[in-house]
Every structure is written in C-alpha cells, then in structure tokens.
Image: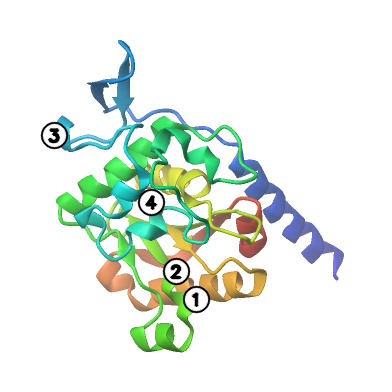
Amino acid sequence: MDLKIKAAVMLVISFGILMTGCTFEKPAAAWTVQNTNSSEETEIYTKGAAVDELFTEDSKVQDIIKDPAFGGFGRLIFPADRPIDDELTLENLDDILVWYSHVNPERSVSIVNEMKKRIQDGEQIFYDIYTEEEKKEDPAKENTGLFFFRGTPGEKVAIVNAGGGFAYVAAMHDSFPHMQELAKKGYNAFALIYRPEAQTACEDLARAIAFIHEHAEELQVDIKRYSLWGGSAGARMAA
C-alpha cells in the first residue's frame, strides 16, 4: 500500500477510535425531574415534552422498543443482534453493550427522549435504505437504516458509524451521542444501523451515502461535502 494512503487510513482509524471515549457537555436547555430512586434531581437533556411523557433511567428497554412513537424501528434503537431481557432498564444498558465501559444512563435517557420529542414535533427520524423487495431477498437487511437528527436545513451532513466489533451495533453509546451533539451544532447528522460484518457493514454505508445523495432535496441537506465518523469497527468503515 502507498505510504501516504496507509498514513491517511491510520489517521481516520485513530480519530474514530478516539471518538469512542469522547464526552460532551450537556446542552444548555434541560428538563429537571425528580429521580424516583433518590432525593436528587436528574437532568433530562431534551426539552419540550411534558415531564410525565419522558423516559427515565428506570424505563424498560422493551417498553421503549414497543413505544408507538417508534413503530417499525424501535428495535433498532438498541442492538438488534443481541438478546434483551424484559427487565433490562436504561440504567443498566451497559449489560448488553459488550466491550464498552462508561456507558452513561443519563445520556441514553436524553437520546430516547429527544427521539420521541422530534417525532412528536412532526420530524421523521428514521429512514430505510433498502426497499421491501431487497429486504425479502436478504432478511438481514431488515436490521438496517438511518437515524436522522435534523440540524439547520441546508447545512452539511455528518454520518456516524458505531462500533461493536462487527458483532452488533452499539449505536446508543457510540453513534447516537455524536449525532445528538452534531445536530445541536447545526449539522444534519445521521447514525447508520448496519449489518454487523465487515463487508456488509461497508456495503450498507455505501448504500446510506447514496441514499442521502438521492434524497438530499427531501432531507434538506447539503451533501456536496460530508464527513464520516466512527468508533472502533465504525472507524474501520469510515476508513
């Protein structure tokens, strides 16, 4: 491999791996609600929804998956390739995020609340990248798609790829937080849910990029120059 190309690939991989450990400042606007397990107050990062509609750290993952707001794609918010116990809560989400540490329950809560709030505000936050015919031909494509947090209409695009060792997609910890922060800064941010094998993951990323190009007007995004982000396996995809 040409040394310049090799150096560039390693730079992208290193950047993506470093992103896995990044932390972000909390958004300025936040709900403050009472934590039912203590006397402390807990900040919920998303805003605009009634307090009794918010998910909390005690919310069961299966209840979130089945929430009518997430009809058709709720299972893809969490690792679709790992078993999820009926009693698993957002507080203990790290139980299924193998190889990851420092999973922040407050961040997980903020993400699902923002997803629901955006839907309540009339936004479409999930897009299929394959047709129904393609999914029938290859059922594994059922567990793919793009989550979208709109930033400023007409602004540039960022596509984030989570890691998971090409065994599962750890989006809740390794791409949704980045998507959330990028959108807050005005970028139109996407998080890809892909088939977790190296070859199929790259095929899904290529398809996702093509999908955004083909639907740029509908999505109201500038796709002329876009950025690819990733952590761990997602960094290899970006490279």
Q: Nearer the viewer, mark 2 or mark 3?
A: 2
Circle 2 sits in a helix, a strand or a loop, which is it?
Answer: helix
Circle 4 sits in a helix, a strand or a loop, which is it?
Answer: loop
Query: Which x, y percent locates residue 139?
Result: 46, 80
Pointer 1 or 3: first along the chain: 3
Pointer 2 or 3: first along the chain: 3
Label 3 neighbour load within 10 Å: few <14, some 14-19, many 20+: few
Q: Nearer the viewer, mark 3 or mark 4?
A: 3
Query: Which x, y percent locates residue 89?
Result: 39, 38
Q: What's the mark number on residue 50?
A: 3
Q: Identify which amino acid the numbered label 3 is placed on.
A: Ala
Q: Identify which amino acid the numbered label 1 is placed on.
A: Ala
Q: What's the mark number on residue 143?
A: 2
Q: Nearer the viewer, mark 4 or mark 1?
A: 1
Q: Nearer the viewer, mark 1 or mark 3?
A: 1
Residue contact at pointers 4 and 2, CB within 8 angstroms: no
Query: Which x, y percent locates residue 186?
Result: 34, 47
Q: Nearer the viewer, mark 4 or mark 2?
A: 2
Q: How many marks?
A: 4
Q: CA distance from mark 4 to mark 1?
A: 30 Å
Pointer 3 or 4: first along the chain: 3
Relative to residue 156, is residue 95 drawn left or right?
right
Q: Residue furthest front?
A: 86
